[in-house]
Image: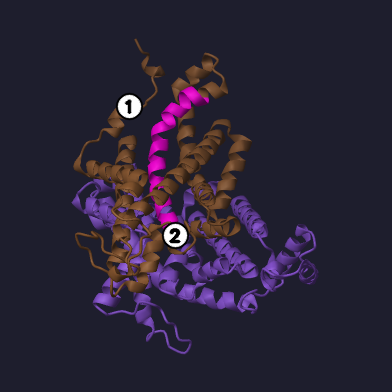
Chain colours: A purple, B brown
Amino acid sequence: MVQFVVRRLLFTGGVLFLISLAIFVVTEVLPGDAAYLVLGKDATSEKLALLRSQMGLDRPPSERYLGWLGGILQGDWGESMILRRPVWPLLQQRLANSARLALLAWPFSVLLGVGLGLAAGLHANRWLDRTISALVLFAVSIPSFVLAVLLILCFSIWLQWLPAASMLAAESDFWSSLRFFILPTLVLTVISSTEVVRIVRLSVIDVMHQDYIRTAKGKGLPAHTLVWHHALRNALLPAISVLALNLAFLLGGVVVVESVFAYPGMGRLLLQAVTQRDLPLLQAVALVSAALFALINLVADLLLFSLNPRLRSL
Amino acid sequence: MQHPVLTPHLPRLRSFLGVVDPVSLFSLAVVTLAVGVALFGEWIAPYHFSAQNLTNSLQPPSWQHLFGTDQFGRDILSRVMVGCRSIVGLATASSLLAVILGGGSGMIAAYWGEMADEVLMRATDLLFCFPSMLLALLIVSALGSEMVYLILCIGVIFAPGIARVVRGVVIDLKTREFLEAARMIGSSDSRILRREILPNLFNWLLVELTLYFGYAILLSSSLGFLGLGVQPPSPDWGAQISEGRDWLVAAPWIVLFPALAISTLVVAVNLLADRWMATLRR
């Protein structure tokens, strides 16, 4: 067991290292380096060379990579080239904003996903299952931005019940700005619960065919005890990794939905860094989102491991 | 007489494709229509996709303009028809690339096992650590939004998912008797891969191709929506929806028709994949 945990921790460490390397390499390939971007198109080659040596861009890539990584490990995330501000406070603020949205959407998606998945799995191939599966298929097939724009059209423009963009005033408190969160939360809940429904449905169907369930049925256990005490516990195990991936996505990967609603979160910061070619910002945001993915995955695996006694003999 | 042991369990392609029911017929019709419009849309479109007519802007759907006109008086129907080519072409090419990359590596990993398996599976683990949108944005920002790079980008992003499925199927196939028999009669590895494994994998690859064709449409239209897809002036469904947002109050049809086009196409593709998957699992 200790071996499993140690191996998993080492693997995550390796993944984090490779992620940082991959991000550095990809942003290195970008045409036009930082000095070029600062000076613009009509920079003379002397000026470029001067600025490059000032910014340390003339050093070999390996040295720059170690310098960048070392800086991050010491809490120096560099400065945004466009905004001319340190990256770290900006990241913190945007991550906090994404977390607010995630804290609303994630619990809803857990409830909706597990609830519908359970209902569909217990009524496999009957009308309830068919209806739920059809709904999931539609939800998977409609792009998130189409869903978001249609909801804006419906609730903000035709009915005029809800605001279309999330104008977060710094001083407004949580409850008064809750109206802004309704539409983004709705879209995110829909897109993140589909995979949960699918996996819970499949695993409920699988579990209900197991011998121990047949034994429990044979003993004459009432249906609710059967489902809540015996079936659900095992059926939820495979859903844990999907739920973890969803959380990671909501914290760092919601590029499209945050853009539609003009929500100042991590995803929009990433898009901004890409479209403005703000390299230090792009590296930092990409590193944080990918690291969040790796770490949340690690937590999910360890959780799965502690919840499932069968894995402990590994 | 055929030895039952030696006959691979290969569902016949005809019985696999010929699931004739209303839903599949609808899906096939939609996909055929999309492919037809993608091929010939430029010639059958009633107007030129960028022909502006400012006296005729923001017109609701009518007989002259079935889908209405946008803020420059351009015909929405023509723009949707011409935009079909780039998205269907992009999705076809990138899902094919993903199937070739993912299918090939999954097959190799499962067949040779050990080191090859370990390396390829850890590589897919690493790619899974990047949310697909993050990966797409990184690649597009590094390479640019040309068609070739978009295809490459989406193909690479989807390959690991296919590799995992194919690996599972091949590991299962490796335990079957007909493979044992092929090895007994001295077939080489490449012959076994080509003549025994690939035909059995074919239906799975077809389902994955269909599934990822749908995902590719979603991802590429999202990139288009974010302004990082196929660049103007050629119309793009995602970009059309993004631009139309400014006119939601006055002319919702600018957004509604491309939205309807994307959603219908992806629903149809997913319905097909769903049906075929069910036939395969049976």
Quarter occupied by the C terminus of chain B: top left
Quarter occupied by the N terminus of chain B: top left
Residue at the spot 36% in from the left edge and 46% down from the top edge? B38
| Residue A287 coordinates in the image, percent (x, y) | 61, 64
Q: Nearer the viewer, residue A4 or B100?
A: B100
Task: Tell which circle, 1 or 2, labels the residue nearer the N-terminal end.
Answer: 1
The residue type indicated by label 1 comes to: Arg
Inspect this view and state whether residue B130 appears.
no
Q: Nearer the viewer, residue B269 or B102?
A: B269
State if disc 2 and disc 1 touch (CB < 8 Å). no
State left or right for residue A42 relative to residue B130: right
- Name the main secondary structure of what is drawn in magenta: helix
**Vertical side of B98 occupied by A89: above or below:** below
| Residue B126 coordinates in the image, percent (x, y) | 58, 51
Image quarter of residue A239: bottom left
The 10 Å Cα crowd at callout 2, few under 14, some 14 to 19, many 20 or more, is few
Asked if labels 1 and 2 share a chain, the reply is yes
Residue at the spot 79% in from the left edge and 59% down from the top edge? A60
The residue type indicated by label 2 comes to: Pro
Which residues are drawn in magenta? Answer: B193-221
State left or right for residue A174 relative to residue B276: right
User: Gap between marks 1 and 2, in whole Å?
Assistant: 45 Å
Q: Nearer the viewer, residue B202 or B67?
A: B67
Which residue is labeled 2 in the image? B233
Which residue is labeled 1 in the image? B12
